Image (spheres, grey):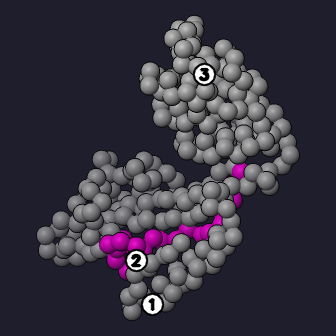
């Protein structure tokens, strides 16, 4: 993994500290399975005002229509990085680091007219003359590692159906649920249609539900109860057919299976 940082003489000491911290983190990460690593991203946001021919940026100046003072890449609210908790069954493997890649100034800030502008329009400086750069953002990143092997025995997803549900209910996005399921099915088969149905219920989006059905197709019993649960969770006919193909069901039976009540 290559990391390129912008180096500027007036801030050389600060940049050296960032480089050293990230280098230590990357050396640690090189020893870990890449599939177990996840990068958390938080944006710090501020709005600028002009007073006596000078700019003043502050979180307090943000408008109701702006992104919150701390947000995810989509602009939704997240807590301050200092209060950002590592999810259950994960551990931090780096500190919060300012991403100095791209158009940023010496402190990692990027400037624009508003937060909803295209990524390519962000600048590395504030234009005081035209005041076209009235907001700024700074990207913070931190890496965490999945620690399934280090979980207490009582909370391990291999110890019962309820525990895997409890674990995935704590996840905020479908991708993290699928990551947990991938680890779960390495040592477990699904024998309970209700568990299969409950897992699908936890998925937020149609594409996530399809991914779960395809992921678990080889781990479920091909009974009508399982097939019914999978088909009932899928909204689109094309997704239903893809699920049946993953189950390796004879195409001659598709019509009968799709008509199961």
Could you say which quadrant of the image residue 29 lies in? bottom right
Give left or right: position of 205 versus 147. Answer: left
Q: Can you name the residue that lies furthest to the bottom here?
A: 9
What distance separates the C-alpha of mark 3 from that of mark 2? 58 Å
Magenta run includes residue 106 = yes
Q: Nearer the viewer, mark 3 or mark 1?
A: 3
Residue located beneath label 1 in the image: 12
Question: Relative to 54, is 111 above or below?
Answer: above
Q: Decide: few, some or many residues near mark 2? Use Cα within 10 Å; few <14, some 14-19, many ≥20.
A: some
Mark 1 and mark 3 in contact (Cβ < 8 Å)?
A: no
Residue 5, horizontal then vertical, whole percent: 44, 79
Q: Nearer the viewer, mark 3 or mark 2?
A: 3
Residue located beneath label 2 in the image: 107
Magenta run includes residue 4 = no
Question: Relative to 152, is 25 above or below?
Answer: below
Q: Can you name the residue that lies furthest to the left here?
A: 130
What distance separates the C-alpha of mark 2 from that of mark 1? 11 Å
Residue stretch in magenta: 89-109
Secondary structure under tag 2 reads loop
Could you say which quadrant of the image residue 188 lies in? top right
Secondary structure under tag 1 reads helix
Question: Relative to 52, is 165 above or below?
Answer: above
Residue located beneath label 3 in the image: 249
């Amino acid at each position: 993994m290559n990391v390129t940082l912008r180096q500027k003489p007036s801030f050389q000491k600060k940049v050296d500290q960032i480089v050293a911290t990230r280098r230590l983190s990357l050396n640690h990460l090189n020893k870990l399975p890449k599939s177990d690593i996840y990068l958390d991203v938080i944006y710090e946001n501020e709005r600028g005002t002009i007073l006596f021919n000078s700019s003043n940026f502050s979180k307090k100046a943000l408008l109701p229509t702006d992104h919150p003072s701390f947000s995810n890449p989509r602009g939704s609210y997240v807590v301050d990085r200092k209060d950002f908790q590592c999810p259950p069954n994960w551990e931090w493997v780096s500190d919060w680091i300012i991403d100095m890649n791209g158009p940023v100034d010496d402190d990692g800030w990027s400037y624009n007219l508003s937060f909803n502008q295209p990524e390519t329009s962000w600048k590395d400086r504030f234009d005081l003359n035209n005041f076209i750069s009235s907001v700024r953002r700074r990207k913070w990143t931190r890496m965490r590692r999945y620690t399934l092997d280090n979980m207490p025995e009582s909370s391990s997803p291999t110890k019962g159906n309820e525990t895997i549900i409890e674990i995935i209910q704590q996840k905020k996005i479908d991708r993290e649920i699928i990551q947990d399921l991938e680890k779960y099915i390495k040592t477990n088969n699904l024998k309970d249609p209700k568990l299969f149905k409950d897992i699908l219920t936890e998925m937020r989006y149609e594409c996530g539900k399809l991914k779960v059905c395809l992921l678990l197709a080889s781990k479920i019993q091909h009974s009508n109860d399982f097939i019914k649960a999978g088909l009932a969770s899928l909204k689109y006919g094309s997704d239903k057919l893809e699920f049946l193909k993953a189950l390796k069901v004879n195409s001659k039976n598709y019509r009968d299976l799709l008509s199961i009540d």
